[in-house]
């Protein structure tokens, strides 16, 4: 399946099919006639199976130079120091404006590699090969690149679309169940605001038996949204559903109730969705979260979550533009002041205890 995404400067294709990684060289070669002879820096992290990056590097080496850079995994490494490592490697290799970077991994790798591409020599080509559910259904689409800085998620970045996105569902076979659920949280988010039928699939079927359909429908939703609002001046804000509180609890180091395990990004978004929906939607949402193994509350300092929410990049003066879901398949934008945000946080954030 090839999904074209239009941008203000042209567009790019998302190739989503099983086995796509094995023909990555052919897909890259089809981008442009002068593809041969280029340097390709493949950026991955130490949590991604090394053979994925090796496959890409070997394919690129057939027509030019290639190298692999492996950075530390985890959101805590989505920072200036890691970005500098990528940029320094491009300088060391003598990369020019005709060369490219290729991200192989999850959303953290994709965000940082894309930002490095935007910055290096004021912009070079980049290709995204997402290998997690989270990155395949969400962060690989839309051209947002960023790092975290000064305690705020994704506050330093650029809108810089890739030249190509290659999604191979077979790479998901190496993911643990928790990481699969972590990614499905983002697809669930899109179903709640934009696709009631997709939510009913989550509600009434086994989502794991419908992974291809769920991923493709989520990508099509995000494609439609970002094509209408590439720079997030209006409609694209709907994709922040669950993220206002979710980002706050993530940065506050929230833990899972019961066992004290630190929550992953998608798990934080799941809690954030539970905070930002109506009682009627919440009644339907909670059983779906339980089915997926996702939490509906978090353990951390509620006052710290509130502070982080009010300093989120979506803040506008004394309020934060939040996305509410009053009915499955619909949404509304609502500026919320500190008291309103605090009330939402209180629904899902409990004291910092196991």
Image: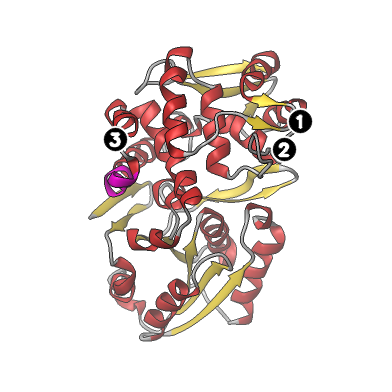
Residue at horizontal 41 percent and vertical 30 percent from the top: 288
Colour setting: secondary structure
Magenta part mainly helix, strand or loop? helix
Q: Secondary structure at mark 1?
A: helix
Please name the residue shown 29% across and 41% down the image: 217
For residue 21, which quarter of the picture?
Answer: bottom left
Label 2: element kind: loop
Q: Quadrant of residue 78?
A: bottom right
Q: Which residues are magenta?
A: 208-216
Q: Position of residue 248 (x, y in %)?
A: 66, 34
Q: Are marks 1 and 2 in contact (CB under 8 Å)?
A: yes
Q: Which residue is mark 1?
A: 304
Q: Which residue is labeled 2 in the image? A: 252
Residue 128 position (above or below residue 153): below
Residue nearest the observer in this picture, 58 or 176 = 176
> What x and y, as percent, mark residue 271?
56, 30
Q: Which residue is mark 3?
A: 205
Residue at 53% x, 30% y is 242
Quadrant for the C terminus, please. Answer: top right
């Amino acid at each position: 399946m090839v999904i074209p995404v239009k941008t203000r400067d042209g567009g790019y294709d998302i190739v989503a099919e099983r086995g796509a990684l094995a023909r990555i060289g052919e897909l890259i070669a089809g981008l442009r006639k002068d593809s041969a002879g280029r340097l390709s820096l493949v950026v991955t992290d130490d949590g991604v199976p090394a053979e994925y990056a090796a496959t890409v590097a070997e394919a690129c080496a057939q027509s030019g130079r290639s190298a692999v850079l492996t950075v530390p995994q985890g959101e805590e490494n989505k920072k200036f120091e890691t970005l500098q490592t990528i940029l320094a490697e491009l300088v060391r290799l003598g990369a020019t404006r005709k060369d490219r970077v290729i991200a192989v991994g999850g959303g953290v790798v994709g965000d940082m590699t894309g930002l490095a591409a935007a910055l290096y020599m004021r912009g070079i080509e980049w290709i995204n090969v997402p290998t997690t559910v989270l990155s395949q259904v969400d962060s690989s689409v839309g051209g947002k690149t960023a790092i975290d800085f000064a305690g705020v998620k994704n506050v330093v970045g650029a809108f810089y679309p890739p030249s190509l996105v290659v999604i191979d569902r077979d790479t998901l076979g190496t993911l643990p169940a928790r990481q699969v659920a972590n990614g499905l949280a983002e697809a669930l988010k899109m179903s709640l605001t934009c696709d009631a039928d997709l939510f009913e699939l989550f509600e009434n079927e086994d989502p794991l038996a419908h992974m291809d359909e769920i991923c493709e429908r989520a990508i099509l939703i995000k494609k439609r949204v970002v094509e209408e609002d590439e720079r997030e001046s209006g409609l694209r804000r709907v994709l922040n559903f669950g993220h206002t509180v979710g980002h706050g609890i993530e940065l506050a180091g929230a833990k899972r109730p019961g066992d004290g395990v630190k929550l992953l990004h998608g798990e934080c978004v799941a809690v954030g969705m539970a905070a930002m929906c109506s009682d009627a939607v919440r009644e339907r949402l909670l059983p779906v979260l339980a089915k997926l193994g996702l939490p509906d509350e978090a353990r951390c300092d509620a006052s710290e979550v509130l502070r982080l929410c009010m300093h989120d990049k979506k803040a506008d003066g004394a309020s934060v533009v939040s996305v509410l879901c009053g009915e499955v398949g619909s949404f509304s934008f609502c500026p919320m002041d500190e008291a309103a945000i605090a009330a939402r946080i209180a629904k899902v954030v409990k004291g910092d205890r196991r």
